[in-house]
Every structure is written in structure tokens, then in C-alpha cells.
Amino acid sequence: MRHTTIYAPQDQFTGWPANNGLWSWKDEILVGCSVGAFKAQTGHSISGPIHSELLRSLDGGETWAAETPAGYLNDPQPLKDLDRRLDFSGDGFAMRVVGTGYHGTDEPDGGFFVSADRGRTWGGPYRFRGLAEHGDLQSLQMTPRTDYLVTGSQSCLLFLSVRDPDTWGADRVFCARTDDAGNSFCFVSWMVPPTDPYRAVMPSTVRCTDGTLVSAVRRRDMQGGPCWIDAYSSADGGRMWTHLCRVGETGEWNGNPPALAHLRDGQLCCVYGNRSRKQMIARFSVDQGQTWEPEIVLREDLNSIDGEPDFGYPRLTQRPDGRLMAIYYWATKDHPQQHIAATIWEA
């Protein structure tokens, strides 16, 4: 198990890969982060305007370079209709979903950016045309991060969330679909319906070898208590969902979202942070998320200058050599301001 520092700009707070996205093409890995001036304070020690950056590696995560491509998030523009047909199966395709209520974006109607050249140039933001008109979604705010599965050259499943605009923490997760190359979207199903009593947001979804969908979801009881991760599955392409189990605990301070990966040997791996224990954790499942092996502590050397348990929000990928790479934000004695780090280990 090896820890690396990916991006630690001086006097900056850099965080939230889970809010930004990760895309990989063999040894080429692209991950997003949010950056702002560091100011030690309660909560998030970030001050002033927040901007988005992309970090790219061409050697499986050994070395990295920061990029701020034109047209990507930092140049606010109104939502517009997609003016072409997307090729979701294209070698360089990447999608970045945006919503409201989190760091770096504020789009209550939701939207998406797309790239056809592995994130070097982007177009957007585009509307989820047709989605807001669905009866279950009317008058709700979109709060999604990026979670999608390509199902064909013109079709894609997206796993999104909405909330009552007057109730912070009322997020619930649903599945949507496009079958016409991104020109329109339809509501498919609730993964976690509005009748569920607990916050559900930031799903991380994979497709298993037999086509089963498994999603790990961030949960919280807004009345108090520690937060956790739940697992859900669908055997019919997202039309119906079943709660599988509780994957792990993410502690207090609003917990942490999960990063889920389907490995080449068929296992699932879920990575998340526990803020109460100040640990980054991995768990494996050999039965498509129905049960999970004991926790593996990836890291527990948090040492932030602000004293806050502010870390995690991981993304996860498997490299061509089979090793796993979890990317998250962290703070250490050598880099006491929050920065982007990674843990690489054998699956």
C-alpha cells in the first residue's frame, strides 16, 4: 500500500474529487477537484471564489499535471439545448454532471458538460431536456454529481438526485435514461424514493458481469447520529431497485460519499471516509454487494492545520496492472492544508 500526493498548491484548499468526477482510459486518468484560498476555520477551510481544475496522469497515476480547459465550469453560462448527437461509446467521451448545493457549481435545474477528447475541451452546460417535466420531479432542485453508465453509442443511464428547495438534506436518488444521444432524458425509477426517511445522495454505480447494477449511496439521518453507506441493486436495467445492505459507517460531520468499482476479477470494492475515526476505508464484496468483507484501513494519518476532520470524497479506479487507486482529499504533517492525494494498493 502506497500513498502519494497528487496536487498540493501552496496556500490553497483543494478537495472533493467525488463532486467533480474521474474518467480513465487505460493508463490515462483524469480527475476533477475544487480549489480556493486556504483559510483555517470551522467546517471547510476554503475562502473566496472556488474554481474547478482537472488533474491528468498519462502513466497510471504516477505523475500528474493540472489543467483548466476553456468551457469547463469556470466560465458561467446559461443552460442550453444540446446541438448535436453524442457518441457515448467514443474512445474519448467524458460527461460531467452539475447541480446545486455543493462546492463549485450552482445549477438548480441540473445540467451536463461533455467532452469527446478525454477532457481536453468541453461543451455545455446542456439541459437534461424533458427530465424536469416528469411529475415526480416537478418543483424539485437537482443535486447530482457525476454518475453514469454507457449502455450504447446513443444510450446512457444516469444516477441523479433531487431535493425540496426549502429543505437541505432532503435529497433522494433516481435513475434517468437517454436513448437519443443526449437530446432528451426520461425518468426511469426511484432508487431511494421520497418516502424514505433519510438523506440519499451521491450514488456510485457499477454494472456487474451479468448486467446487474449495484450502487453505493451516501446516507444520513437529518435528525442526528452518524452517517453511513447503503448498497442497492437492479436486475432489470434500473427499472426496479432492491436495498441490499449497509456497507459501512462514515461517521459524523455529514459523513462521506462512497466510491464503488467493479474489478476485473468480479469483486466489488467500495472506498469511503469515516470522519469520526479519521480513516479512509475500503471494503470488498464477492457476491455483488449483498455482503462485504471486513474493513481495510487505507489511511489514518490525518493531520490538518485547521484541526477539522475534513477529508475524503473519493473516486476509485483500477489500473491496467490490476492495482487499485483511490483518489481523495487529505492533510498530513508535510502538507497540513487539504490537498489531493491517493492510495495505491493490490486488489
Image (cartoon, helix red, strand yellow):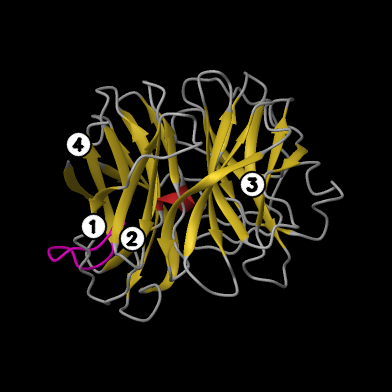
User: Which circle marks residue 62 in the picture?
Assistant: 4
Q: Is residue 335 visible?
A: yes
Quarter of the image with the C terminus in it = top left
Mark 4 → mark 2, Cα distance in angstroms: 19 Å
Q: Which residue is mark 1?
A: 8
Q: Position of residue 154 (x, y in %)?
A: 67, 21
Mark 3 → mark 2, Cα distance in angstroms: 24 Å
| Labels 3, 2: front one | 3
**Where 48 sits versus 324, above or below?**
below
Question: Which amino acid type corresponds to the residue marked 4 in the rendered image?
Answer: Glu
Query: In the rendered structure, does residue 242 fall within the stretch colored magenta?
Result: no
| Labels 4, 3: front one | 3
Q: Which residue is mark 2?
A: 14
User: Which circle marks residue 160 in the picture?
Assistant: 3
SS of the residue under disc 3: strand
Mark positioned earlier in the residue sequence (1 or 3)? 1
Q: Position of residue 212 (x, y in %)?
A: 58, 26
